[in-house]
Amino acid sequence: MNATNNHYCMVGFYLKNTLSEQGYVSRGVCQVDENHFLETVNERTHIERKDGTIQYKDIENGWLSLDEDTVVSMNMWGFTPDYFEYSEKYFVDFLKTGINDLKSEYFIPTMVDHLIASKTSDVKVLETTSKWFGVTYAEDREVVVNRLKQMADDGQYPSPLW
């Protein structure tokens, strides 16, 4: 633990449990130390299964491999109020530099990585073996509906859910 007084947490999923069968996804790729603290998190905006392995496109559109057990962020964070003060300042800078780039995105992991690197904060990673599912592509909808129904049938969720 290298940080000062600000302690956050993050649920860390295994990459293999977060992919869509329909296409590429974006994930915060994490480096976690032996004490389960986040060392770095880098947003990768094009990750997919390709040629039997999980790969992502780098900034030059080259393909690099990732281990399927890599811990990734699905933006399930636990922050204290100070995070939002840091984030607001960073967002103002982000707008100044990215205002003309219609494809630019403000990534939470980028802010968190900055706070870790500056030793302003640390992040405890709570790893889970749970399988993520969601609607990234329209074709994901049926899978999600069926999965929610199965979870309700198994008693994991109430029925009706809503």
Image (cartoon, helix red, strand yellow):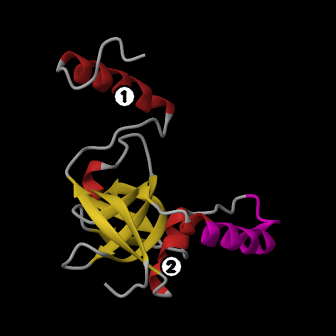
Relative side of 42 to 10, left or right: right
Q: Residue at x 48, y 63 (%)?
A: 80
* Foreground of the two, 62 or 78: 78
In this view, the mark in front (1 or 2)? 2
User: What is the number of the mark on residue 115?
Assistant: 2
The part of the chain drawn in magenta is 85-102
Was residue 96 drawn as part of the magenta stretch in this picture?
yes
**SS state under label 1:** helix
In the image, which disc is placed on residue 144?
1
Residue in front for this viewpoint, 100 or 57: 100
- Identify the amino acid type marked 1: Val
Residue 5 point in image, percent of width and height: 43, 80
Q: Residue 156 appears in which quarter of the rendering? A: top left
Q: Residue 12 in the image: x percent, y percent?
A: 30, 59
Crowding at mark 2 (Cα within 10 Å: few <14, some 14-19, many 20+):
many
Q: As displayed, is residue 133 above or below residue 111?
A: above
Q: What percent of the width, then of the height, locates residue 84?
A: 60, 64
Magenta stretch secondary structure, dominant: helix
Quadrant of the image containing the N terminus: bottom left
**Residue found at x 39% / y 23%:** 142
Q: Is residue 33 left or right of residue 30?
A: left
